[in-house]
Image: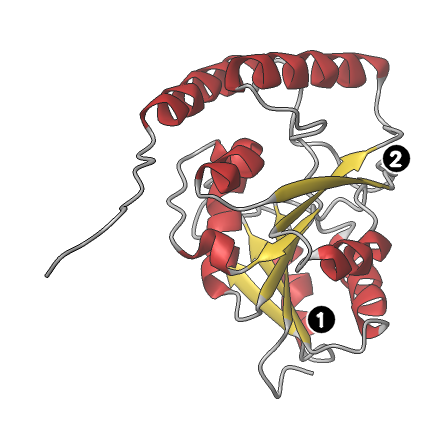
């Protein structure tokens, strides 16, 4: 399907996901084939130290829809998303994680809503995580929403679909992927949320813990709040030349 311009670009950051990446690609391909639309699958290998990119190289031989990007070193999820956005050729971009906790079968449903809304965000209605992670996520979402005056249920859910125009002029900084819905709103795009499936992690190991991102996320939150207060919102009423 990559012989023609894709309608949809699926962007997937991956870091040390040698156990799950082949199955992830298989599930994404199955879901996207059902849409009947031209698509590409962009996997950004975030400087993996395992065989993730070697597996991608092998998958490419039989999967022409696959585009694989490899970082020279680990740069973080925001950088991986940014590289994927800039590589994408589709009119619609969908995102998900490579660990298969996001369900690729949800992507067509989110994509179908793009048009009614500029941005469609998934929220994990039933979290398949530890109690500690669920509680910490609920607290983090509450704090973010209170300080940014938002109502986003689940900013930690990577499963989203949006018009490519939403990221065309977006300048991202490290850690900003957690605040994409807010950044989209600041740029005037419409955002909605829909419930999505969430699955327990069965392959590989989680790269994120509760405490290894707590203070960094709090710092990023204050940065976003600063941006909200100083965002330029002028409207030109008339111009004479």
Tell me the quarter of the image containing the C terminus. bottom left
- Camera-side residue: 205 or 68? 68
- Residue placed at 50% from the left, 53% from the top? 166
Left or right side of 147 for 197 = right
Location of residue 197 (image quadrant): top right
Residue highlighted by disc 1: 59
- Taking the image as drawn, is residue 51 in sight? no
Q: Is residue 151 above or below residue 3?
A: above
Give the crowd class for mark 2: few <14, some 14-19, many >=20 residues within 10 Å: few
Left or right side of 45 for 224 = left
- Taking the image as drawn, is residue 30 in sight? yes
Left or right side of 41 for 189 = left
Residue 228, position as x, y percentages in the image: 41, 26
Residue 185 marker: none
Local secondary structure at mark 2: loop
Local secondary structure at mark 1: helix
Residue highlighted by disc 2: 200
Location of residue 150 (image quadrant): top right
Coloring applied to the structure: secondary structure
Give the crowd class for mark 1: few <14, some 14-19, many >=20 residues within 10 Å: some
Residue 28, position as x, y percentages in the image: 78, 62
Residue 57, position as x, y percentages in the image: 63, 69
Left or right side of 85 for 159 = right
- Residue placed at 44% from the left, 46% from the top? 73
Tell me the quarter of the image containing the N terminus. bottom right
- Camera-side residue: 225 or 135? 225
- Camera-side residue: 190 or 161? 190
């Amino acid at each position: 399907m990559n012989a023609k311009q894709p309608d949809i670009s699926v962007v997937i950051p991956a870091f040390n996901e040698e156990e799950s990446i082949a199955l992830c690609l298989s599930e994404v391909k199955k879901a996207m084939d059902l849409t009947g639309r031209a698509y590409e699958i962009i996997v950004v290998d975030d400087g993996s130290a395992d065989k993730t990119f070697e597996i991608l190289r092998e998958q490419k031989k039989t999967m022409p829809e696959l585009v694989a990007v490899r970082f020279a070193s680990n740069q973080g999820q925001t950088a991986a998303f940014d590289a994927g956005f800039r590589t994408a050729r589709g009119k619609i971009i969908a995102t998900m994680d490579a660990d298969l906790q996001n369900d690729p079968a949800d992507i067509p449903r989110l994509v179908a809503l793009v048009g009614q809304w500029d941005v469609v965000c998934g929220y994990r209605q039933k979290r398949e995580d530890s109690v500690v992670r669920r509680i910490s996520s609920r607290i983090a979402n509450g704090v973010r929403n209170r300080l940014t005056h938002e109502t986003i249920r689940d900013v930690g859910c990577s499963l989203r679909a949006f018009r490519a125009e939403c990221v065309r002029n977006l300048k991202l900084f490290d850690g900003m992927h957690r605040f994409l819905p807010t950044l989209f709103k600041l740029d005037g795009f419409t955002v909605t949320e829909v419930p999505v499936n969430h699955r327990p992690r069965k392959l590989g190991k989680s790269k994120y813990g509760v405490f290894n991102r707590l203070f960094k996320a709090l710092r990023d939150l204050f940065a976003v709040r600063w941006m909200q207060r100083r965002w330029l919102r002028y409207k030109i009423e008339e111009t004479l030349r």
